[in-house]
Amino acid sequence: MTSIQPIESSTSLVEERNTAKTIVIGLLTAVLVIAAPIVIGSAGGNYWVRVLDFAMLYVMLALGLNVVVGFAGLLDLGYIAFYAVGAYTAALLSSPHLTSQFEWIAALAPNGLHIPFLIIVPIAMALAATFGILLGAP
């Protein structure tokens, strides 16, 4: 009769993470991401900032596609509709076109809403998340 021997506690199957190193790398990455548009905008003008914005947008779309197709093995492009909800929200809130469609908004703001971009982003995110929750709820 054989007996099962317990595994020694000193052996580990998974390497321990160095949390201090992870935090430092995360902070350096955050500083780089925040500083990059400022440095590039002052050195190269707004054109390169716009190019980087579009590049980051495509990176986010590619990461979303990788999660859906790569890890789940399912080609589903429905999540891109939520990008569209956010994009249309941002476009309508920052342009005069919303007032041309709704007279009651035109009475409040005859030249268009023209809300600042930093206020529009959370509104667009919340609206896209709301649509996602409503469509994803059982």
Image (cartoon, helix red, strand yellow):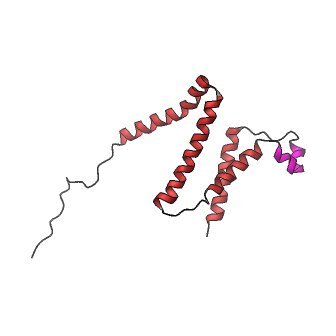
Front residue of 96 and 5? 96
Vertical order, 24 against 74 (above or below): above
Q: Main secondary structure of the magenta part?
A: helix
Front residue of 21 and 66? 66
Count up the numbered dots.
0
Indicate left or right for 5 with 131 as reference: left
Q: Where's residue 92, x and y in %?
A: 77, 46
Q: What is the quadrant of the N terminus in the image?
A: bottom left
Vertical order, 27 against 132 (above or below): above
Q: Which residue is at 64% across, 52% downward?
A: 83
In the image, is residue 97 part of the stretch drawn in magenta? Answer: yes
Vertical order, 95 against 73 (above or below): above
Indicate left or right for 136 with 110 as reference: left
Q: Which residue is at 61% across, 38% downward?
A: 53
Q: What is the quadrant of the C terminus in the image?
A: bottom right
Outermost residue on the top side: it is 43
Which of the 4 quarters of the picture holds residue 132?
A: bottom right
Outermost residue on the bottom side: it is 1
Front residue of 113 and 108? 113
Q: Which residue is at 56% across, 47% downward?
A: 60
Q: Which residue is at 47% across, 58% downward?
A: 70
Q: Where's residue 137, x and y in %?
A: 62, 66
Part of the protein shown in magenta = 94-109
Q: Where's residue 136, x and y in %?
A: 61, 64
In the image, is residue 96 part of the stretch drawn in magenta? Answer: yes
Q: Where's residue 14, x and y in %?
A: 29, 53
Which of the 4 quarters of the picture holds residue 120?
A: top right
Indicate left or right for 74 with 98 as reference: left
